Amino acid sequence: MSSATGSAWSAEAGAGRLNQPAADARFWSGDYYNEGHSHEEIFDKVKEECGVFGVFGHPGASELAYFGLHALQHRGEESCGICTSEEGAFHYHRGMGLVKEVFDRDKLDGLVGDRAIGHVRYSTSGSSKLANAQPLVFKYRDGDLAVCTNGNIVNEPVIRRELEEQGSIFQTSSDTEVIAHLIARSPKDLVEAVKDAFARLIGGYAFLIMTKDRLIAACDPNGFRPLVLGRIGDAYVFASETCAFETIGAEYVRDVEPGELLVLDKNGLREERFAKMERRAICAMEYIYFARPDSDIYQTNLHSARKRMGQKLALEAFVDADIVTGVPDSSISAAIGYAEQTGIPYELGLIKNKYTGRTFIQPSQELREKGVKMKLSAVRRVVEGKRVVMIDDSIVRGTTSLRIVNMLREAGALEVHVRITSPPFMNPCYYGIDTPNPADLIANTKSVEEIRKAINADSLYFLTKEGLMDAVGGHEGEKNRGLCMSCFDHDYPTQVQFEQAKATSCSCD
């Protein structure tokens, strides 16, 4: 284990049942349903961004950070790290892998201090390397500086090139390093330097910055990425999701507002701003898919919001069926909502094997080709002879939807009707979600009817933007009720120079 340690648009339902998928080469490429598909595409989902966690003023800061990051593990499984501060000295450890793999009791005992910031990271292909693991730790004129972020800086390539021309030397491909260079080059006090640095940035981000005597938290002026403030005793905590507070027994205080800068030092908490809120634009995919169902965003519970998405789907696109099932895990809540609204029984028609996530053993080609069955199985006794409504959160390339539909058919389902709790995913994200090339997004190149045929469904319907906004609730009177839906409608809340911007997760190449 590597480590580093230091001091629809609405969709119309398709017609026509396809009861013999094996007869059509478009749907089956071999003797079994997923023959010929590479294992990298087993679950065709947009990838999670990252998760951050911070503590200020608690003697067990590293332990709180460990459990907080463990609660945020779903936001990034590639690498993780914790940095603590004790009397001006930094102690940090980073490594590749899950939180429970990177840290043990000895490593946590070495991370002394009453303040800490931590990070779990997802990277795009080719960037899973220790140099990019966070928090990033730097030396600058006033001592040590540790930085971690969730999100993506759209104009990072422009700023990086400018800094390199001025003599800056970068050690990583992470654009988190850009903020450190901007801060270090400023002659101003730390807080003012941070404000000036953030004023240069375009994108979606939630930052935690720690020095020997301060911890700074900030969200971009649109609030794309969630960040919440909490208390545990006299200590303050920050996290990407409230589920981390539940884990450590902290009390939720409030969400960090767009453009807000919170400074913690020996004098307590100070609330400042580095920018006014241009337009609130919380990532809609946080509500649909990313955040844990036991988390709240702006006091909206994700499980409840997803149930309402399922109920809206039932109202918009009812279909007569025998059972409703959800694709685990993110679509279970919506499937329950659809079932409750229609009166069609909810059943566990699909089961996820929770112990297959990361593997260090390369499987044989035969097992790789059957990889989706290692992770997801249809319950034959539940779906056999039934008309099934399958609820899922999104369709990206369409490869996974095709496999799951065919899996249900192989288990004996008479019909498979697909209902999606988001509008069609048509455009890349530039704010911290890893998305494919637009040409690889099936909704970018195909109509709803063409997608239905491609995934071998009897009918297909995507939740409308209006239905999604009603389900989430959001902020009345604000555009899209305060949601960013650029991946659905191409309405990007910030300036994006598409030929220069990076559409990647966690700001990494």
Image (spheres, rainbow, N blue to C red):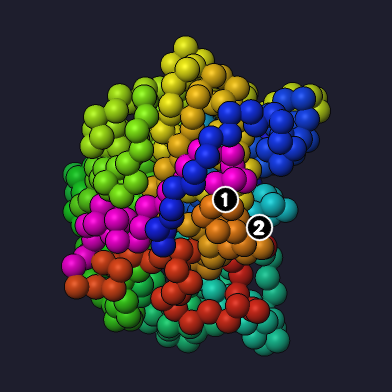
Q: Is residue 366 left or right of residue 499?
A: right
Tell me which residue sits at (20%, 52%) in the image: 299
Tell me which residue sits at (70%, 74%) in the image: 169
Q: Please, which residue is most extreme toward the front here?
A: 16
What residue span does the magenta drawing correspond to? 451-476
- Label 2 and label 1: CA atoms lie apart by 13 Å
Q: Position of residue 49 (x, y in %)?
A: 50, 54
Is residue 421 located in the magenta-colored stretch of the structure?
Answer: no
Tell me which residue sits at (53%, 35%) in the image: 17
Tell me which residue sits at (71%, 31%) in the image: 23
Q: Image height check: is 202 above or below 422?
A: below
Which quarter of the rendering shows the N terminus? top right
Nearest the viewer among 95 and 212 is 95
Which quarter of the rendering shows the C terminus? bottom right
Is mark 2 in CB contact (under 8 Å) with mark 1?
A: no
Tell me which amino acid carries mark 2: Asp
Q: Quadrant of residue 71?
A: top left
Helix, strand, or loop for circle 2? Answer: helix
Q: Which residue is mark 1?
A: 451
Res. 148 in view:
no
Tell me which amino acid carries mark 1: Ile
Q: Are there few (<14), some (14-19), or many (20+) residues within 10 Å of tag 2?
A: some
Res 440 label: 2
- For discs 2 and 1, the disc positioned in front in the rendered view: 1
Looking at marks 2 and 1 on the same chain, the residue that comes earlier in the sequence is marked by 2
Nearest the viewer among 143 and 168 is 168
Q: Image height check: is 16 above or below 150?
A: above
Q: Position of residue 293 (x, y in %)?
A: 33, 40
Q: Image height check: is 383 above or below 255?
A: above
